[in-house]
Image (spheres, coloured by chain):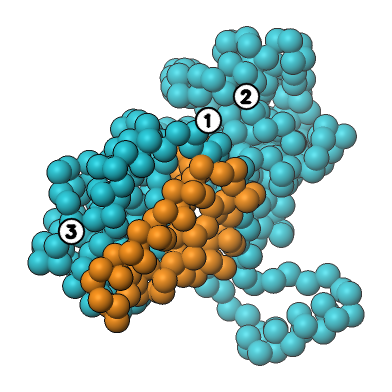
Chain colours: A cyan, B orange
Amino acid sequence: MRVIHYLNQFFGGLGGEEQAGLPLEARAGALGPGRLLEQVLGHDAQVLTTLICGDNYAAEHLEQVTAEIQAKVKEIGADLFVAGPCFEAGRYGVAAGAFCSAIQAKLGIPVITGMALENPGVDLYRQDLHIIDSGPNAAQMRDALTKMARLAVKLVQKEPIGSPAEEGYFPRGILHDEFVEKTAAERLIDMALAKAAGRPFESELMVTTFEPVAAPPPVRDLSKATIAIVTDGGLVPKGNPDKIPFRAATNFGSYNIAGVRDLQGQDYEVSHRGYDTRYVEEDPNRLVPVDVLREMEKAGLIGKLHDQFLSTSGLANPFSNTRPMGKRIAEQLKEAGIDAVILTST
Amino acid sequence: MELEKAGIPVAQVTSVAPVAKMVGSNRIVLGHGIVNVLGDPNLPPEEEKALRRKLVQQALEALKKEGQG
């Protein structure tokens, strides 16, 4: 089995935080944890190349380094790409996730990585990747690598993959059918009894968690700020030109309001089946308050109302849809130089 | 949430504050109702607009302050 292994500067033996600015380099053979990785993989596994990059360099040039790594892996050819384990190291984890995700998607090569639950790379990439729960620090190196190797061999040999609890990876939010002996009611009672007795049990539902997001700094001077209106209430121009679905939307629209004083009901409709949309269709300002913001712009209370409002339909929509959409909205607003957003939610 | 992650301050006007709180929204303004976040068809037009103005003012005030975390 031909393996390419990614390490940060620390695990690659190039130095600590003072070397975090080092660009990507390739070394022949296994290094550091890679030697143990070869052992636990078995199957004549050989680390052909170890790719090493400083954590800061990788974080600051993520797209560039991802492209470089992808090119290297393509050039060398491999059956498996391994990154880390990264434990709690956030920059390392985010970079490892980005590299694994790109190689899996673009080159179709199996990938594996390991991180601690607290690593931001987990939340970013757990849906795309098998990320082994590595535990918090390098004291768990052997255990983490053993689990990574066991799952990696299955991925390479295209064997069936067990549940997150069996294999030790973070739940990816994937449901699959299986035959069970007991009905849902019986399983539920078993779980309730186990919980009451303090015995371990495995829930069949993944509880969604939200990592806290720090509040962005306030707007110092509204009279110089460009404000954009974003809504998840599904307001779209008549005819719904972007065909935004009324539920589980994966796209959003940007609609021109330059010079518009007041939104008129006859020009708009609502693509959203989760609330009674008559009132908004009668007067769209009830959802997208162009009328009062335009007045405030004239009065100098705000610098400028953004020339477009952005709209999507926030109904029955899983985070796998809304997170990427949120990122795209954020990128678009950043490019437009927006200072702040008023988000209206139904 | 993704907007805030990108560093753009957001004032969220909504009548379902628990959901906004659950996902970690930092600046929440309570809207007038689910189907009329920023309006009330039972009011005369001028009063309705005054209500909308007041709520949008609150959103702008929220943007001027540190977030609630």
Relative image position of residue A143 (x, y in whole percent): 82, 41
| Residue that carries the numbered disc 2 in the rendered image | A6
The answer to whether residue A270 is visible is no
Between residue A323 and residue A187, name the one nearer to us: A323
Q: Are marks 1 and 2 in contact (CB under 8 Å)?
A: yes
Res B51 → quadrant: bottom left
Q: Which mark is residue A99?
A: 1
Between residue A68 and residue A149, name the one nearer to us: A68
Mark nearer the N terminus (1 vs 2): 2
User: Counting other residues with Cα less than 10 Å from the Cα at mark 2, is it few (<14), some (14-19), or many (20 or more)?
Assistant: many
Identify the secondary structure beneath mark 3: loop
Which-is-in-front pick, marks 3 and 2? 3
- Could you tell me which chain the residue with mark 3 belongs to? A
Relative image position of residue B49 (x, y in whole percent): 29, 65
Please name the amino acid that badge 3 sits on: Leu
Quick check: A156 left or right of A234? right
In the rendered view, would you say B25 is above or below A13?
below
Q: Residue at x 74, y 87 (%)?
A: A189
Please name the amino acid that badge 1 sits on: Phe
Q: Which mark is residue A263?
A: 3
Q: Which mark is residue A333?
A: none
Relative image position of residue A182 (x, y in whole percent): 67, 86
